[in-house]
Image (cartoon, grey):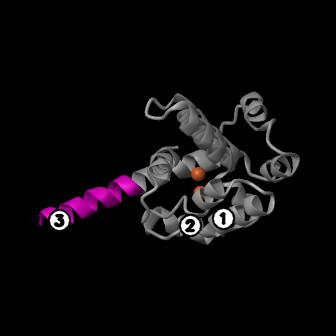
Amino acid sequence: MATSDNILVWWLKRVAYRMWQFKQTVLPKLDRAAWYDAVRELPQPVQEHLKLLRKSEKAHILRVYRAVGASQQINDEERRELLQMALLHDIGKAIVRSSVFMKVARVFLPIGRNEHCIAGARLLNRLGFERSLVKRVLRHHTFSHSDRLLQMFQKIDDSC
Ligand SMILES: [Fe+2]
Ligand SMILES: [Fe+2]
C-alpha cells in the first residue's frame, strides 16, 4: 500500500511540475536584455543557433543560467563550467524539435528526451567545444552516471 501511495505522490508531483512547465511554454516571460547579455560572448555560430530557439526555450535557459549563477554549492571554476552548460545544454532544440504529441505525452508518461541532447552534442563537438562539455550536453537527460557536477546541473535544469 505504502509503495502504491508513494508512486501516486510521485506521479502527481510530476504531473503538477509538467503543468507548470507547460504554462511556462505557453506564456513565456523573457528578459531580452539579460538574454543578450548572457549570450553575447559566445562564438557567432553558437549565437546563430541560439537565435533559432523559441522564446520559452530561451526563458528556460535564462532561468537555468540565473540559478547556476546564484548556486551556493559550487566553486568559481565549477560555476564557469555550469554557466556555459546552462547556455548550451538545450541548443540541440534549434536543430530537432519534439512533436506536440510527444510534448503532451511527456506530461503524463516518463518518456525520454534524447534527440536534442544528441543534436546539441554533435553541433558543439563540430564547433570544437571541450570534450567534457560535449559529453555533459549529450547526457543531460540521462541519470545513470557519476558526474557530480552534471548531477547538480540536472537538479537545477529540472527545477527551471
Ligand atoms: Fe534538455
Ligand atoms: Fe534544459
Q: Is residue 147 magenta?
A: no
Query: Which of pointers 1 and 3 indicates the residue nearer the eye?
Result: 1
Q: Which residues are magenta?
A: 1-14
- Tell me how far mark 2 sits from mark 3, CA to CA: 27 Å
Horizontal side of 52 relative to 120 (left or right) equals: right
Q: Is residue 10 magenta?
A: yes
Secondary structure of residue under mark 3: helix
- Tell me how far mark 1 sits from mark 3, CA to CA: 34 Å
Q: Residue drawn 61% across and 55% down?
A: 132
Q: Residue drawn 60% across and 71% down?
A: 101
**Residue under numbered circle 2:** 113
**Residue under numbered circle 1:** 116
Q: Position of residue 96 (x, y in %)?
A: 72, 67
Secondary structure of residue under mark 2: loop
- In the rendered image, is residue 82 in sight? yes
Secondary structure character of the magenta stretch overall: helix
Q: In the image shown, does 15 or 156 lie closer to the viewer?
A: 156
Answer above or below: position of 46 versus 113. Answer: above
Residue 3: image tag? 3
Badge 2 or badge 3: first in the primary sequence: 3
Horizontal side of 117 relative to 78 (left or right) equals: right
